[in-house]
Image (cartoon, rainbow, N blue to C red):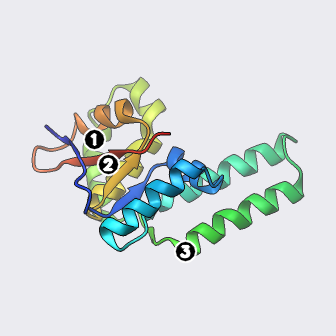
Amino acid sequence: MPIVESPPDLPLAIDNNVFTHLRNKQPYLLEYVKKHFVNTRRLPVIPSLILFESNFGIQKALVTNKISAEQAAFQIQEINKLASIHTVIDFNQKAAEIAAYIFARLSKSDKNQHWRDLFIAATAIANNYGLATQNKRDMELIASHLPTALDLRIAIWKP
């Protein structure tokens, strides 16, 4: 089966929902990060697409007047702090190959809905990380289209 539970000693990348809770310093999430560090001696890494998603959300809120320029600047500063503490992993050639393989097999609706999840999962797989997420169902969809030689290893980090 292409989706498997991540072993506790496997370094993890974080999904967008987990990153949002990390940005907001949710106590339960800080406990998961602490436990991950104890098990791996490493902080979870951040796929570069997470930074895109977070910055895009801020810019969208700014241009639609949902937040002020000061709020946007503060939120961007918080994202940059996390990016300086955690390693950021790039969407590279191997991730591109994995994502293209899966994307070609998704329905049009799934492509529109899950392309960001796909890029995040492909980045984690290509860089030999598991993925801490709250979206098991979405990740199962992506993993169901992986080549048989690859697995998506996930850890569910929920409150």
Question: Mark 1 = which residue?
Answer: 102
The kind of residue on which mark 2 rests is Ala
The amino acid type of the residue labelled 1 equals: Ile
Instruction: Specify the amino acid type for callout 3.
Output: Ile
Task: Please tell me which residue is depicted at 17% across the width and 41% down the height of the picture.
Answer: 2
Mark 1 and mark 3 in contact? Answer it, CB < 8 Å: no
As helix, strand or loop, the secondary structure at mark 1 comes to: helix
Q: Nearer the viewer, mark 1 or mark 3?
A: 3
Q: Residue at x 41, y 33 (%)?
A: 111
Callouts 3 and 2 close, C-beta under 8 Å = no
Residue 111 in the image: above or below residue 55: above
Query: Is residue 19 left or right of 25 when viewed as pictured?
Result: left
Sequence-wise, which precedes: disc 3 or disc 2? 3
Identified at 49% across, 62% down, the residue is 48
Structural distance between the alpha carbons of marks 1 and 3: 31 Å
Q: Nearer the viewer, residue 63 or 69?
A: 69
Few, some or many C-alpha atoms within 10 Å of disc 3 (few <14, some 14-19, many ≥20)? few
Q: Are marks 2 and 1 in contact (CB under 8 Å)?
A: yes
Rendered location of residue 98, percent (x, y)? 26, 51
- Name the mark on residue 85: 3
Quick one: SS at disc 3? helix
The residue carrying mark 2 is: 99
Q: Please give left or right for residue 45 compared with residue 54 in the image.
A: left
- Estimate the spatial distance between the alpha carbons at disc 2 and disc 1, rounded to whole Å: 5 Å
Figure check: 9 above or below 138: below
* Front residue (pair 86, 61): 86
Q: Residue at x 19, y 48 (%)?
A: 151
Q: Quadrant of the N terminus?
A: top left
